[in-house]
Image (cartoon, grey):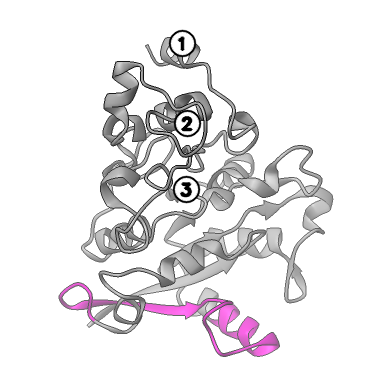
Amino acid sequence: MKELTVVWFQGAGCTGCSVSLMNTQNPRIKELLLDEVVPGKKIALKFHPTLMAGQGKMAIKILEHVGEVEKNKYVLVVEGAIPTAGKGVYGRIGEETILSKFLELAKDANLIIAIGTCATYGGIPSGKPNPTGAKGCKEILEERGIEKTVINIPGCPPHPDWFVGTVLELLSGRVPELDEEGRPKLFYGKLIHENCPRRADFDKGKFATRFGEEGCLYELGCKGPIANADCPLRGWNNGISWCIQAGSPCIACQEPEFPDEVSPLYKKIRWEEENEDSD
């Protein structure tokens, strides 16, 4: 049986992406990590700070061992932004900075998956004034001339299906088709606005002016017209609900502009300008 070796590296973040993944329903996390999820192939998760039993130097030795033995074979999954200010002094793993360890692992990886908006574009840790110099994976690699395939799976946090579906594609021997932001088109190919259950209200000009009212949430700051994801079709928490269904405007948490350029989160966006930019 062939194994896909995976190293899960955590930078500056809240671990929400790991929590989201552990809520995957089909397959469940136990099946994903232990079973043959694709005929003849399975995942071999060698390092994950949240899930593994090893601690301290023992855990770091495992990380170093995988980097040496599985060089250019493993998939590096990065959760959280990478602090770069002060030569990376604002974040450490073991005795090294998060920045230096990330670069070391990235150079020896076969492919990189950046999970969550922090890892993809910097996310909340990179919000102004960004004292730690937090950045996303691809930006850091491009600045240093390191050429690696990076699959971005943004979201704060991302839906577990977006990560699991991408991994299943890799296990099947395929790299998913990506959009201009490095996101799998399968999950990020359409605007939330296109499939929103309140789209008819938008077209009719029926807008909610207070939370809890019926109607489109555009006037309350919904960013669905500029947010790419399949949340309306997929739902969260085993398909039970999602932001707009629960009465909250979309905050475009999977976009490179999050959080600064979409803030204040509950302030109306200028749809006319966004439309002109996309034409």
Residue drawn at point x = 61 percent, y = 38 percent: 259
Q: Nearer the viewer, residue 105 or 155?
A: 155
Taking the magenta stretch, the answer to whether it contains residue 55 is: yes
Q: Residues within 10 Å of mark 2 (few under 14, many from 20)?
A: many
Please name which of the two marks, 3 or 2, marks the residue nearer to the observer: 2
What percent of the width, then of the height, locates residue 116? 51, 53
From the viewer's perspective, tell me whether residue 275 is left or right of residue 234.
right
Lower sequence index among marks 3 and 2: 3
User: On screen, 22 above or below 80?
Assistant: below
Q: Which residues are magenta?
A: 36-65
Q: Amino acid at mark 3?
A: Pro
For disc 3, the marked residue is: 154
Tell me the quadrant of the picture where the C terminus can be found: top left
Q: Is residue 74 visible?
A: no
Q: Nearer the viewer, residue 245 or 187?
A: 245
Taking the magenta stretch, the answer to whether it contains residue 126 is: no
How far apart are labels 1 and 2 at the CA level?
Answer: 13 Å
